[in-house]
C-alpha cells in the first residue's frame, strides 16, 4: 500500500478520534500562550465535552482536519486543518497547532505543514493556500517560510493582548511555488 | 446639534425589512457585474424568498453581533444598497465590513461616500472599534480608489486568490485605524 501522501519524515497525518484524542487536545488548551496563538477568540479553560463535540462534528466539504502523530511512537502531538476550502477558485486557509511542547522547534510542525500542502496540491488540486500568524510568533513564521510560504502583507494592530497591539502576518503559497519535500 | 448616526444629507441607514427590501435585493443578484464587485462567493441569482432566508441565516450565524443597514435615499426612500459588519472580534476591536450600491444609476453621486463616512462614525464612535477591515479584488479599481480616498491603507495582497473570467486575480484587504479616521475628522477633510 502506498501511504506516502500522509507520511512525512517525522510525522504522519491521521484522522482524529473523538474517544481517544479529546482528552489530549483539551489538556493542550490549558496552556494560555499556546491557546492564544491558535485563535483570536478569547481563551477559556477547556472542557473535555467541548473537545469531544468538536471532534464529532461532521467533516464537510470545505474542512479537512488531521491529527499529527509521530512516526517513532505514534504519539498525538498536534493538529493541522485545511479550512474555508473554496473549490471554485482553488484557495484554502490552513491552521496548525503543535500542542505538545516537547515537539516544538524540532521540525515536526514543518514536516506536518509540508504534508498538508502535499494534500492540498496533489489531492485537492488547489491553486493556493493561505495562512495568518501573530507577528510575534517568529518560530511559526520561520517554519512557514521554510515550507515556501511568501509574505503577502500585515494587518495593523489586529491582535490586542496584554495591553499590546500586534500585527497579523498574512502569507500564501501558490501551487507553482510549492516543492514536494 | 444632536449627533445623528443614521441620518445623512442624501441617504439614511434603515434596518433590513424583508417585506419591503427582498424584492430589490433579489434584482441585484441578477446582475453578475454587481456581484463580482461586491461578493467573494460565486455569483448566483436569488429569489426574494431566498434573500429573506439568507438574511435570517446571516443573522443567526452572527448572533447579536450582526450589523446590517439598508442604505435608503432621503429624497424618495428607495433602498439603493447595503452596508454590513461581520466577524467582529470584540476583544481586539477589529471587524470586517462590506458595502454595495445596487444600481449603476446610483453610483458616482457621492451616495456611497456619505454611507461609508456614516458607517465609519458608527464603527468608531458607537461600537468603539479600534480598526475596520475592508476587502476587494484586483480588478475593482473603483473600490480601491474609494477605500483609499476614505483613509484606508492597503495591507494585504493575497495573490491569485480569485479566479474569474479565465484568469486569477489578487484579493486585496484594506485597514483603517480609529485614530486615522479621527485625524481626518479634525482636519475637516470629509
Image (tube, coloured by chain):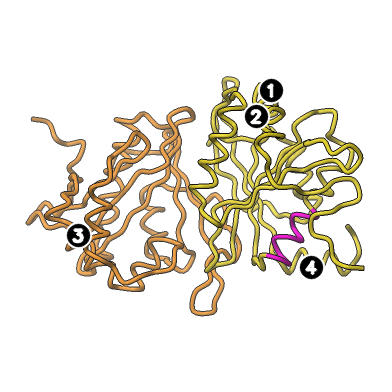
- The residue where tag 1 is placed is B31
| Image marks 1 and 2: residues in contact by CB distance under 8 Å | yes
The numbered mark 2 sits on a residue in which chain?
Answer: B
Depth order, front residue of B19/A113: B19
From the image, state whether disc 4 or disc 1 is nearer to you. 1
User: To which quarter of the image does residue B74 belong?
Assistant: top right
Callout 1: residue from which chain? B
Q: Residue furthest front?
A: B19
- Quadrant for residue A164, please give it: bottom right
- Residue appearing at x 41%, y 34% in the figure: A175
Mark 2, mark 3: which one is toward the viewer?
2
Of badges 4 and 3, the one in the foreground is 4
Mark 4 touches mark 2? (CB < 8 Å): no
Secondary structure type for disc 4: helix
Q: Which residue is mark 4?
A: B182
Same-subunit check for callouts 2 and 3: no
**The hue in which chain A appears in the rendered picture of the protein:** orange
Q: Are marks 1 and 2 on the same chain?
A: yes
- Which region is colored magenta? B117-126
> Left or right: where does residue B162 sit relative to residue B147?
left
Subunit of mark 3? A
Give residue B41's mark.
none
| Nearer the observer, A123 or B127 | B127
Is disc 3 placed on a helix, strand or loop?
Answer: strand
Could you tell me what secondary structure mostly forms the magenta stretch? Answer: helix
Say which residue appears at 44% left-offset and 63% top-offset.
Answer: A41
Q: Which residue is mark 3?
A: A77
Can you tell which mark lies on residue B35? Answer: 2
In the displayed structure, would residue A78 be above or below residue B56? below
Q: Nearer the viewer, mark 3 or mark 1?
A: 1
Amino acid at each position: 500500500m502506498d501511504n506516502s501522501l500522509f507520511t512525512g519524515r517525522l510525522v504522519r497525518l491521521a484522522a482524529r478520534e473523538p474517544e481517544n484524542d479529546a482528552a489530549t487536545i483539551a489538556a493542550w488548551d490549558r496552556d494560555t500562550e499556546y491557546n492564544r496563538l491558535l485563535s483570536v477568540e478569547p481563551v477559556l479553560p477547556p472542557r473535555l465535552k467541548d473537545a469531544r463535540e468538536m471532534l464529532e462534528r461532521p467533516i464537510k466539504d470545505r474542512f479537512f482536519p488531521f491529527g499529527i502523530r509521530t512516526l517513532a511512537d505514534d504519539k498525538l502531538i498536534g493538529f493541522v486543518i485545511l479550512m474555508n476550502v473554496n473549490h471554485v477558485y482553488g484557495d484554502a486557509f490552513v491552521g496548525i497547532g503543535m500542542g505538545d511542547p516537547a515537539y516544538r522547534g524540532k521540525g515536526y510542525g514543518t514536516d506536518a505543514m509540508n504534508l498538508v500542502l502535499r494534500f492540498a496540491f496533489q489531492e485537492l488540486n488547489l491553486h493556493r493556500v493561505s495562512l495568518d500568524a501573530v507577528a510575534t510568533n517568529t518560530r511559526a513564521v520561520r517554519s512557514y517560510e521554510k515550507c515556501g510560504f511568501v509574505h503577502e502583507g500585515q494587518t495593523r494592530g489586529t491582535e490586542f493582548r496584554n495591553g499590546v497591539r500586534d500585527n497579523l502576518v498574512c502569507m500564501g503559497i501558490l501551487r507553482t511555488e510549492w516543492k514536494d519535500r | 446639534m444632536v449627533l445623528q448616526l443614521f441620518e445623512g444629507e442624501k441617504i439614511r441607514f434603515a434596518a433590513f425589512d424583508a417585506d419591503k427590501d427582498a424584492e430589490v435585493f433579489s434584482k441585484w443578484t441578477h446582475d453578475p457585474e454587481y456581484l463580482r464587485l461586491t461578493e467573494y462567493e460565486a455569483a448566483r441569482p436569488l429569489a426574494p424568498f431566498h434573500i429573506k432566508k439568507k438574511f435570517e441565516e446571516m443573522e443567526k450565524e452572527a448572533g447579536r453581533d450582526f450589523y446590517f443597514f439598508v442604505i435608503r435615499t432621503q429624497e424618495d426612500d428607495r433602498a439603493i444598497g447595503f452596508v454590513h459588519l461581520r466577524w467582529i472580534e470584540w476583544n481586539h476591536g477589529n471587524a470586517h465590513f462590506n458595502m454595495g450600491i445596487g444600481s449603476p444609476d446610483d453610483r458616482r453621486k457621492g451616495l456611497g461616500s456619505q454611507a461609508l463616512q456614516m458607517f465609519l462614525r458608527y464603527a468608531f464612535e458607537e461600537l468603539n472599534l479600534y480598526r475596520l477591515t475592508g476587502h476587494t479584488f484586483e480588478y475593482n479599481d473603483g473600490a480601491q480608489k474609494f477605500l483609499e480616498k476614505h483613509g484606508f491603507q492597503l495591507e494585504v495582497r493575497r495573490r491569485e486568490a480569485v479566479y474569474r473570467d479565465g484568469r486569477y486575480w489578487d484579493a486585496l484587504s484594506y485597514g483603517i485605524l480609529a485614530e486615522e479616521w479621527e485625524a481626518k475628522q479634525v482636519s475637516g477633510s470629509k
